Amino acid sequence: MNILYIHQYFKTPDEGGANRSYYMAKALLKHGHRVTMLTSHNEARKEKIVEGIEVVYLPVKYSNHFSYPARVLSFLKFVLLSKQYLRSRHDFDKCIVSSTPLTVGLIGLWVKKRFNLPYIFEVRDLWPEAPIQMKVIKNPFLKWSMRKLELRIYSKAERIIALSPGMRNHIEKLVTDVPVDLIPNMADCHFFERVKQKDENLEVQLGVKDKFVISYFGAIGPVNDLMSLIRCAEISTDLPIRFLIMGEGSGLDAIKKHVQAEQLNNVFFIPYGTKEEVRDVMNVTDACYVSFLHKPILRTNSPNKFFDAIASGKLIITNIQGWIRGLVEKKHIGFFADSDFPTEFKEKIQPFIHSKELLESYQNSSRAVAEQFFSREDLSAHFVQVIEGKNFKQEAAIRSIFSLSA
């Protein structure tokens, strides 16, 4: 098939960020399909071949530092430019539309109506519920219209892909006649390894020699609640812990200023980097911190760095209720620490600092979960079969791991 893949924030491993659409497109190519990726960047329009993927970059500026109105304008500009491009290029057999933002669904609705092109809608985050619960969207009419748009996008899709059981449950309550497939984010168990011996040169370079290292990777914004990690650092100054933060976002400057003002000498910031640079920091890391604000809708999230962490065989520390907490606790790959009670973190982390055997047991279990249930090869094969309209044989296995975390 000739497949149009729409993802406004397509990234390759060299660029850093989430690479799901890159790997899914590669899997489609491997199975004999042609893929055109329609995306955006902050430069002039260009088209190029990225490892067999035909990538069309539309000139739509975006930054995590944008205000909400500026973000909306960016979303709508991408829709407009995508339609302009597709008026002269519509030789496709099927369309994949990957959110967020929800507005990309407008492109799916348009190509279906104008060219009778079926689309599959991939839900990475639940919009508009997330901005509504974050009180970013307050206007009652806007809430109503966004929910109506969400329902319309779902109901017109050929199939829907959800990244977590919470997302799937939400969607199935809204639409009953569209198949909803569960394909979580992937653990790249070939790129990330379970390293039992840290690289001494990296330890010295990062200033963490002979320390227990807890790292945070990813976005630093209002929903990520990184202050919960800082509160853990504030009460742990008497422990041999170093906290490493490798990320970017609108909340980074405020976090840095707080750390400086409080003179926290156990917190270090590392520039946001490529996938290779993430792997280097993972090498010296003992545990990874995964956090979101306490909002019900955020419990459904499927954060990329969680999967990088388990692929690397790291102890997982999370403040998230929902499926991630259930999985972490029931599979013995980490622990839940309520961010409202930082002393809980201090109590729970000390056994892992004092017992190398306990730490290694949890780290080994973390890697095993990644290999058994979230391998990139298995889940990308599932994705391809969904796009091809087939049923996936390992659906039962995927359901089984999430049933443990319910």
Image (spheres, grey):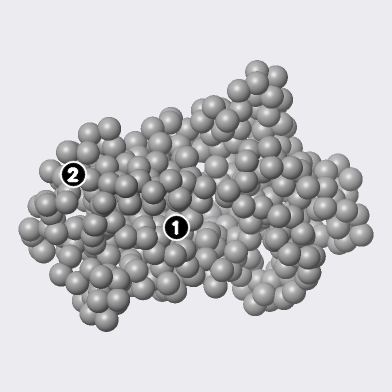
Name which residue lies at 70% across and 19% down: 141
- Residue sitting at 44 percent across and 57 percent down? 247
Image vertical order of residue 27 relative to residue 52, above or below: above
Q: Earlier in the sequence, mark 2 or mark 1?
A: 2
Kind of element beneath mark 2: loop
Furthest-left residue in this view: 354
Residue 135 position in % (x across, y down): 54, 27
**Which image quarter: residue 131?**
top right
* Residue 56 figure quarter: bottom right
Farthest-out residue, front: 261
User: Where does label 1 land, which residue?
Assistant: 247
**Mark linked to residue 14:** none
Left of 253 or right of it: where is 310? Answer: left
Which quadrant of the figure contains the N terminus?
bottom right
Question: In the rendered structure, which amino acid carries the disc numbered 1?
Answer: Gly
Which residue is more in the foreground, 31 or 146?
Answer: 146
Q: Quadrant of the C terminus?
A: top left
Q: Residue furthest bottom?
A: 201
* Kind of residue at badge 2: Ile
Residue 105 appears in view: no
Q: Would you say 336 lies left or right of 164 here?
A: left
Q: Residue at x 35, y 46 (%)?
A: 258
Foreground residue among 50 and 168: 50
Depth check, front residue: 392 or 306: 306
- Residues marked 2 and 1 touching at CB (< 8 Å): no
Image spot of residue 386 (x, y percent) = 61, 54
In-image side of 92 versus 195 (left or right): right
**How much space separates mark 2 and mark 1, taking CA atoms?**
22 Å
Q: Position of residue 16 (x, y in %)?
A: 52, 66
**Residue of label 2:** 235
